[in-house]
Amino acid sequence: MDIQLKRGLLDVCVLAAIKNEDSYGYKIIKDLKPCIELSESTLYTILKRLEGAGMLTVRTAEHDGRLRKYYHITGAGLRRIEEFKTEWKEVISVYQFVAKETLA
């Protein structure tokens, strides 16, 4: 798969995983497992990129005596999910065009 396409898909998957509630790294990986395998190093790279783009914020809170980072989606992150839904319709259309069998 094209690296840029995959990168965009992973970004949106992570945003979708925190759309309804704040979450932390291990839980995000666990929540995404049914649709995609994601390593911790890949996830944290994505989270840093999304934070830098203003699509999520981070807060630190104590949990069982340890500090844990919780990620919260912003308005920009929610808009990115909506943009993706619109873009995805175009991707499906292109896929259908490429995948259709020619009549001969």
Image (cartoon, rainbow, N blue to C red):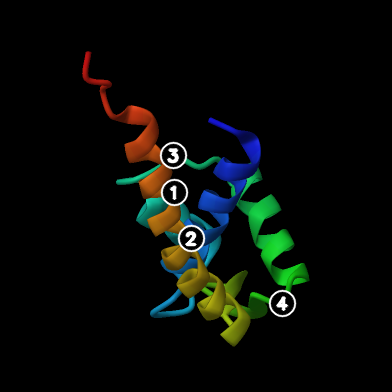
SS at mark 3 in the image: loop
To which residue does mark 3 refer?
37
Residue found at the far right of this picture: 52
Which percent across, then down, holds residue 23?
Answer: 48, 71
Q: Which mark is residue 91?
A: 1
**Residue under label 2:** 87
Gap between marks 4 and 1 measured at Cα: 25 Å
Near-viewer residue (33 or 78): 78
**First along the sequence among labels 4 and 1:** 4
Q: Secondary structure at mark 4?
A: loop
Q: Please, what secondary structure does the residue beneath circle 2 have?
A: helix
State the CA–CA distance, disc 2 to disc 3. Answer: 23 Å
**Residue 54 marker:** 4
Mark 4 or 3, nearer chain start? 3
Give me the C-alpha separation between circle 1 and circle 3: 22 Å
Mark 4 is surrounded, within 10 Å at the Cα level, by few (under 14), some (14 to 19) or many (20 or more) other residues, namely: some
Amino acid type, residue under disc 1 in the picture: Val
The nearer-to-camera label among 2 and 3 is: 2
Residue 23 shows in this picture: no
